[in-house]
Image (cartoon, rainbow, N blue to C red):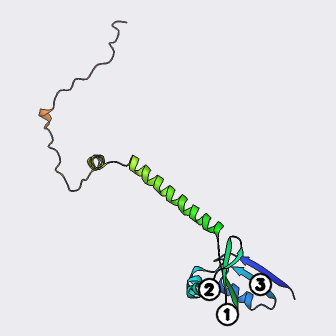
Amino acid sequence: MLSSTFVMDRGIPTEAVLEEMRSSDREIFYLVGTPRRKIRQYEKKWLDLAWQKVRESVEVKLFAEAGELYVLAKSEGRRAKESAMRRKKLARLLRKLRAMQRRGPRRDQLLLRIGAERSRQRFSFPPTPAPARRRSGDAQQLSVPSGPAQAEGG
């Protein structure tokens, strides 16, 4: 009989697909990243097991349950990668916060901006009384500069 081996990432196969693989007439082997909920489900079992060194920088914990072999692995390389990812994310956040501090308006500037925006709006809250209008007889004479003098004659 032929056998097949499948390697799948966490979340790719459904439980129905895995059940189909388990009950197949052919011998099927598979390695699947375990969903986090299932890891939490077996957390107490993981705690009781000892780490086994499989390579210089890789350690594993193994346990069998209901015909399945579960493997919990940790490695220095992965730990370093995750630490670097967290550091990078934190550095990015700090850069953004510093940029916000540098360009962010101070309290007084912010209040001036809010006031300027309120004066541009039709309605202000709370409503302020409209300024008194001048009567047409009270209008002031405006002097308007004239354009260049036109040539006389011709």
> To which residue does mark 2 refer?
49
Answer left or right for 129 relative to 31: left
Q: Secondary structure at mark 2?
A: loop
* Above or below for 82 versus 23: above
Amino acid residing under circle 2: Leu
Q: Which quadrant of the structure image shows residue 69? A: bottom right
Q: Position of residue 99 (x, y in %)?
A: 44, 49
Q: Name which of mark 1 and mark 3 comes first in the sequence.
A: 3
Mark linked to residue 66:
1
Residue type, label 3: Phe
The answer to which quarter of the image holds residue 88 is: bottom right
Look at the numbered disc 3 and give the secondary structure of its residue: strand
Quick one: which residue is furthest to the right in this view? 1
- Check disc 3 and report the residue beneath it: 29
- Mark 1 → mark 2, Cα distance in angstroms: 18 Å
N-term mark: 1 or 2 = 2
CA distance separating discs 2 and 3 = 24 Å
Q: Position of residue 136 (x, y in %)?
A: 14, 35
